[in-house]
Amino acid sequence: MKGFDPAVLIEAARAAREQAYAPYSRYRVGAAVLGKSGAIYTGCNVENAVYPLGLCAERVAIAKAVSEGEREFVALAVVTENGGTPCGACRQTLREFGEEIVVLIADTSGTYRETTVADLLPDSFSAEDLGGG
Ligand code: THU
């Protein structure tokens, strides 16, 4: 799959955000990742009374995709009320699957900006770095 419609991916992330379980932070996040197969996998943040166990929306979406056999990604959209950007852990998780992945960072009004994993996580560590011993 080559081109994609940003509006479709952002809408999937917006809808996923409706499922956010965020009783502690009240900060609701939705994500959607487009696999090269053309399938879209969604995620929301899932918090826990043991705070550090909370899951970010982006990593939920990636885990769902990988567990369904998808390992190559075109783009990921994340939606929050204020256009918050993916956290460092989510950037590194995305990086595992490529620097060229497009990242759409949207707010609930529909405004978004487009960037890439490479731009969000420059000089990143990856599997190649493990080669040197
Ligand atoms: N959160 C995400 O889901 N993704 C991010 O990239 C940043 C933070 C969630 C985690 C937590 O449930 C809430 O937002 C506040 O940090």
Image: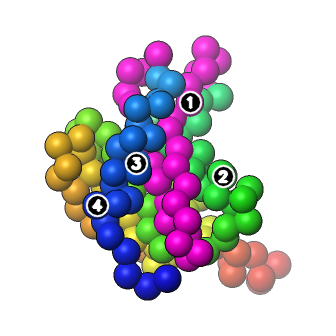
The residue identified by callout 3 is 13
Kindly indicate whether the residue at mark 4 contacts the one at mark 3 (C-beta within 8 angstroms). Answer: no
Residue plotted at (37% across, 74% down)? 4
User: Of marks 3 and 4, which one's residue comes earlier in the chain?
Assistant: 4
Q: Quadrant of residue 93?
A: bottom right
Magenta segment boundaries in residue numbering: 23-52
What x and y, as percent, mark residue 122? 43, 71
Residue plotted at (45% across, 48% down)? 31
User: Of marks 2 and 1, which one's residue comes earlier in the chain?
Assistant: 1
Residue plotted at (56% across, 50% down)? 61
Residue plotted at (22% across, 56% down)? 112
What x and y, as percent, mark residue 3? 38, 81
Secondary-structure class at tag 2: helix
Specify the quadrant that holds the C terminus.
bottom right
Q: Which amino acid, by three-letter code, is at mark 3?
A: Ala
The residue identified by callout 4 is 7
What x and y, as percent, mark residue 37? 59, 75
In what quadrant does ligand 1 lie?
top left
Kindly indicate whether the residue at mark 1 contacts the one at mark 4 (C-beta within 8 angstroms). Answer: no
Residue 91 visible in the displayed image: no
Dot 2: within a 10 Å radius of its alpha carbon, few (fewer than 14), some, or many (20 or more) residues?
A: some
Q: Quadrant of residue 80?
A: top left
The residue identified by callout 2 is 63
Q: Quadrant of residue 132?
A: bottom right
User: Of marks 3 and 2, which one's residue comes earlier in the chain?
Assistant: 3
User: Of marks 4 and 1, which one's residue comes earlier in the chain?
Assistant: 4
Q: Which amino acid, by three-letter code, is at mark 4?
A: Ala
- Disc ID at residue 46: 1
Dot 1: within a 10 Å radius of its alpha carbon, few (fewer than 14), some, or many (20 or more) residues?
A: some
**Closer mark to the observer between disc 3 and disc 2:** 3
Q: Is mark 1 within 8 Å of ligand 1?
A: yes
